[in-house]
Every structure is written in structure tokens, then in C-alpha cells.
Amino acid sequence: MEDFNKSRIMELPRSVVIGHNALQSIGDVARDLHLEGRGLIVADENTIRIAGEKAESLLTEKGYDIEVKLISEATMETVEDISNFIKSKRISFALGVGGGRPIDIAKCSSHRTGIPFISVPTAASHDGIVSSTASISVNGRNKSIKTHSPLAVVADTTVIASSPHRLLAAGCGDIVANYTAVKDWRLARLMRNEYYSSYAAALSEMTATMLVENSAAIRPGLEESAWLVMKALVSSGVAMSIAGSSRPASGSEHKFSHALDIVAPGKALHGEQCGVGTIMMMYLHNGDWKMIREALANVGAPTNAKELGVSDEEIIEALTMAHTLRPERYTILGDNGLTRDAAEQLAKETKVI
């Protein structure tokens, strides 16, 4: 009998604060985590006004010296710029205040420089709020970069509920993607003997189920809706941390989304694309794709090409090239992908085109 030698590292947030006026606790959270020295807030022009200035004031009241850097793009050049700033100013911890870009930049640059960061989302648009990966543009293409999980998450549902509902609906699309991501992961275990965590997979699926079962209750401007979606996004991020990769929440539907980024850049949000991708990939898995479609419609997320703002041809092109992205990640698309005829039939059968 062979000696037991399995070993895994799970990196999880130490503190998660979600709820009404949660931002008020940011100073106490920093003190409870024993953070010292100078802090850095990374935000953009909108999020600094929405929550960044308040966070700066609250941290200053607790005796912290806070620097602020505004970013406009989540590129590797921006990561290098913020990393150099952290080193030159001797920053001890960072806060990413925003939707996607500020959090990804804070996450990536803090990881590079070896300092902790706190995630302060202003919208519930994707599960990167809690995950240990960052989406960074490298040479014009978005790349998923391994970083570290936030030391803490402070999600103020008052702020999140006041953000455009489209962002919350996009977050729902990113959550339902867990269904097909886990199915792809199981397939990869069978076909490629890939590492698989039953615990992470179960948590991921439970999160998606919770969202789908409550989809009819998710409405614009409701703090309870923001609360529900944020809890699901945090749970999804924890599943990825347990797995040590994005496998529990990213599969063929994400490949489709990344392909659509190339074919039709800037036309739809990441979560919106993932949601539509999940409808089609669930069909390929012989799953309940109509359930996914209905849940997305309930929350006001796109379910077809027209609602995404892309053409039928762009959907088909993205489907046929999706398998070429991240080829090391095995999914229902296999190694050879879909033919044009198969892609067109899939999109028509699921009413995406």
C-alpha cells in the first residue's frame, strides 16, 4: 500500500462583511486584521466617488495614511505601474474599490509586491470579487492570471443595489455558469484524469441552484437582491479557492465568452456572455438548458444574440473557435470543437439565434 501523500493549499478570505452600510466597517476590518502602515486605494473615476472617497475617509479616521490611484484599464502595463507605486511609496496593504478592473489590478499588483489586499466591490457583476485569479489584458487579449485571494471582502449592499441592474444581472450569468463548469470538470476527470474536488464542485453547484431558485425575486434597486447575488458570488469564489483553480466556475461557457471577446469585443459584459454560453453548453451536456434560460430571463439578463448586442454570425464564429482557447482545459467542446453546421444548429435549437 502506497503512503498517503496528498497535499492542498486553500487560500480563503479571513473576513467577509456583506450587508447594509457594510462600508462603514472598513476601518474596523483593517484594524481587526492587524493591518499597519500605509494603504492604497485602487479605483476608477466612478468608483472613487461611489465608495472610494468614503473608504479613504473611514480608514483615515482609524489613523491610516491612505494613497489613492485611479486606473482606467486592466492591462499588464497598469499592473506594472501600480506595482512600482506600491514599492516606491512603501505601501503595506491595498484596497480594490470597484467592479472588475480596480479589483483585478489591486489583486494582481498586491500579489506581485507581496502585500495583502481587501476587495470592496461596488457592483456584483462577476465572481472575481473573491477569487484568486485576475482578468488582465495582455497584448490586447484578456488573460486569466493566478494571484491571491483577498484578505477580506467588504460588500455594501446599499452601494451595490444602487449600481445599474445590468451589472447585477451579469453577476447572475457568471453564477449560473457554475452548472456547466462543474459538468466540464467532471468530464475532464473522466477523460484526462484531472484533479477534481467533490467538495468544491458541490459548493459551486449549490451556489448556482440557490441563484436559479431565487431568480424571480431578483429585481432592480432591491438591497435584498444585491445581498442574494453577493452571497452567491462569494460562495463561488470560495469554491475556486478550495479547488485551487477556477475549474468550479469556468468551463466551456467561459471559453465561449472569451471567444466572443475576440470576435465582438466590447459589445456585452463578461457575465452576460457566460450566461448565454451556459444555455448552449447545458444543451450539449444534455442538461436542463431551458431552466438556465428562464432564470436568466427572470433576472433581466440576455438570453440570445440580439439581447447581447451581437450578430448571429458572431455567435457562430465564437462557438467554432471556443475550443482553441485554453486548450489545456478540457470541456464538452473537446479538442476539435464544433463544426460551423453544428454551431449553427446548437444556437438555433437553444434560441440563441
Image (cartoon, rainbow, N blue to C red):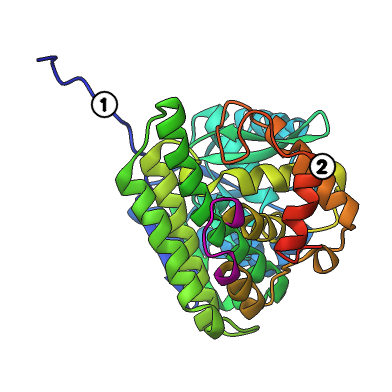
Residue 145, labelled with which disc? none
Return the residue at label 1: 7
Front tag of 2 and 1:
2
Name the amino acid type tagged 2.
Arg
> Relative to 106, does residue 309 appear above or below in the rendering?
below
Return the residue at label 2: 340
Residue 155 horizontal/vertical position (percent) = 51, 66
Residue 92 horizontal/vertical position (percent) = 50, 38
Residue 225 horizontal/vertical position (percent) = 54, 79
What is the magenta range? 283-291
Residue at point 56% right, 78% down?
158
Q: Tell me if 244 is positioned left or right of 322 in this view.
A: left
Q: Tell me if 16 is positioned left or right of 121 in this view.
A: left
Number of residues whose C-alpha sits closer than 10 Å to that of mark 2, classed few (under 14), some (14–19) or many (20 or more): some
Q: What quarter of the picture does the C terminus occupy?
A: bottom right
Residue 138 horizontal/vertical position (percent) = 76, 30
| Nearer the observer, 63 or 103 | 103
Name the amino acid type tagged 1.
Ser
| Nearer the observer, 353 or 215 | 353
Residue 166 appears in the figure: yes
Residue at point 57% right, 62% down?
55
- Quarter of the image where one finds residue 219: bottom right
